[in-house]
Image (cartoon, rainbow, N blue to C red):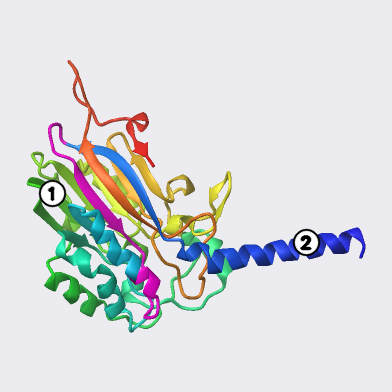
Amino acid sequence: MNKLGRALLATTALGAATVAYAAGIERRHWTLRTATVPVLSPGAKPIRVLHISDLHMTPNQVSKQRWVAALADLNPDLVVNTGDNLAHKDAVPGVLRALGPLLDKPGLFVFGSNDYYAPRLKNPVRYLLPSSKTKRIHGVTLPWRDLRAGMIERGWEDMTHVRRTITVNGQNIFVAGVDDPHLKRDRYVDIAGTPDPNAALRLGITHSPEPRVLDPFAADGYDFVMAGHTHGGQLRVPFYGALVTNCELDRGRARGVSRWGSHMWMNVSAGMGTSPYAPVRFCCPPEASLLTLVPRPVTPGQGETRGSDSELART
């Protein structure tokens, strides 16, 4: 075999091994990401928030269901679910089994596109195109109302176009959420306005972290926004990061905690699932996030500050 033949053979073998790893190993490598975020009012007690997103559950994903259920052992003060729970018309029981022990905790949720509509087989090249260049074609309608009823029955609150004050760990949190911006179902005007300035935290929730939604949250004075949708890029290249975000958010914020504007923080979850038609992850394992929210630092003589990038600790 000549040098070219050996090179082609080696390249083919490497590509096959990479696909096998991405499809068979990494997409089931359940991971807990942790971070400490300075977003509470001075003097507030820390709040532990478990962020779950993008389960994309199908009925036979037993290991995912068990891992999610075991997250209740972390004993979070609050659980936030930012949507895309479903990937199959018969997946509601599996999602409720996964969330079961967590439904005993205070919880908030909004829905994403794959709660409303099933995924469809499509050319994978479309995923690499800017979201503004692709046309959305809906799959069959999914039983999102059944999922909503199951979560509400256990005490979780649907934050879709709602503003509300809740009590967590003995402290008031002002929360507002929007419907899925990816489907252009968001109506920020329904929740617009200054949040309670006396709350320990002003929290925004959305499925897709579209700048057109993040900007008004920041302008209204929210401290923290939680989102999902991006899958962290799903396919990440070492030393480069996410190839795409599947929305208008820049690639550098495809997962994890970052700043938005001068004072607001946000966490974008890389999520725990994939479309059944693109069951691969590379350099981006499925994740849930345990976020410890702590008070913003106060500089003596200068009043309250909103923190800086160097004050964020991540593990």
Q: Is residue 56 magenta?
A: yes
Q: Is residue 306 magenta?
A: no
Q: Quadrant of the C terminus?
A: top left
Q: Looking at numbered disc 2 in the image, what kind of residue is underneath it?
A: Ala
Q: Which residue is mark 2?
A: 10
Q: x and y percent of residue 221 in the render?
A: 20, 40
Separation of marks 2 and 1 at Cα, in angstroms: 56 Å
- At a point 32% along the width and 38% down the height, the residue shown is 261
> Please, what secondary structure does the residue beneath circle 1 have?
strand
Q: Which residue is mark 1?
A: 174
For this rendering, which residue is in front, 96 or 259?
96
Which residues, given as a range, are shown in magenta?
41-65
| Earlier-in-chain disc, 2 versus 1 | 2
Q: Residues within 10 Å of mark 2 (few under 14, many from 20)?
A: few
Residue 215 visible somewhere in the drawing: yes
Magenta span main SS:
loop
| Badge nearest the viewer, 2 or 1 | 2
Residue 185 visible somewhere in the drawing: no
- At a point 47% along the width and 75% down the height, the residue shown is 276
> Please, what secondary structure does the residue beneath circle 2 have?
helix
Q: x and y percent of residue 11 in the render?
A: 75, 61
Q: Looking at numbered disc 1 in the image, what kind of residue is underneath it?
A: Phe
Q: x and y percent of residue 164 in the render?
A: 10, 55
Kindly give the residue lying farthest to the top in the view shown.
Answer: 301
